[in-house]
């Protein structure tokens, strides 16, 4: 009976493992979402990350956290507040439920965020 060496099998297993690991790394890097630095984030990105948790993607405030905090529908608030008033709320926060964002985002980003709110009303 002929004795089979395990060396070719071991080399094939190692090569296969390396190829699998490389493919895994390539695929996970390709499909993972990279979050841009705060300075480069769009108003929509900021809204979806910070505001939609309570106000919802549509601004209605019908999320679990929004209902608990009794947030108002942003779309209804838009007609009642000036841009300056809305910017102040985003900068300073409101009550105990809404954080202040003036240290986290630039004035330009906050203004763009308020402009994004206005698109929700349409």
Image (tube, helix red, strand yellow):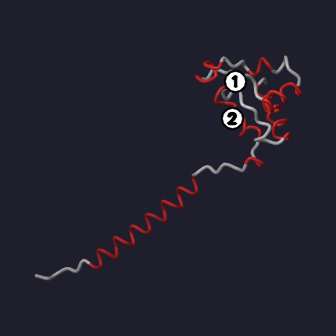
Residue farthest to the left?
1
Give the numbered dot on residue 96: 1
**78 displayed left or right of 15:** right
Question: Distance of mark 2 from mark 1, alpha carbons?
Answer: 15 Å
Q: Quadrant of the N terminus?
A: bottom left
Residue 71, position in %: x, y? Answer: 69, 19
Q: Is residue 119 above or below residue 15?
A: above
Q: Residue at x 77, y 49 (%)?
A: 40
Residue nearest the viewer, comparing 68 with 33: 68
**Pointers 2 and 1 in contact (C-beta within 8 Å):** no
Assign a secondary structure to mark 1.
loop
Q: Residue at x 72, y 38 (%)?
A: 46
**Which residue lies under the disc numbered 2?**
50
Residue 52 lies in quadrant: top right
In this rendering, the count of numbered labels is 2
Assign a secondary structure to mark 2.
helix
Residue nearest the viewer, comparing 81 with 92: 92
Q: Residue at x 72, y 31 (%)?
A: 99
Q: Quadrant of the C terminus?
A: top right
**112 displayed left or right of 64:** right
Residue 65, position in %: x, y? Answer: 60, 24
**87 displayed left or right of 9:** right
Residue nearest the viewer, comparing 3 with 70: 70
Q: Of label 2 and label 1, which has the lower sequence position?
A: 2
Q: Which numbered disc, 2 or 1, marks the residue closer to the eye? A: 1
């Amino acid at each position: 009976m002929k004795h089979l060496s395990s060396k070719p099998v071991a080399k094939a297993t190692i090569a296969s493992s390396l190829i699998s690991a490389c493919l895994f790394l390539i695929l996970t890097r390709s499909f993972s979402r990279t979050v841009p630095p705060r300075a480069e984030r769009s108003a929509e990105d900021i809204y979806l990350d910070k505001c939609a948790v309570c106000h919802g993607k549509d601004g209605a405030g019908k999320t679990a956290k929004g209902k608990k905090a009794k947030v108002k529908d942003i779309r209804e608030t838009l007609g009642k507040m000036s841009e300056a008033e809305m910017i102040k709320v985003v900068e300073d926060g409101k009550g105990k439920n809404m954080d202040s964002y003036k240290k986290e985002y630039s004035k330009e980003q906050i203004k763009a965020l308020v402009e994004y709110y206005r698109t929700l009303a349409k």
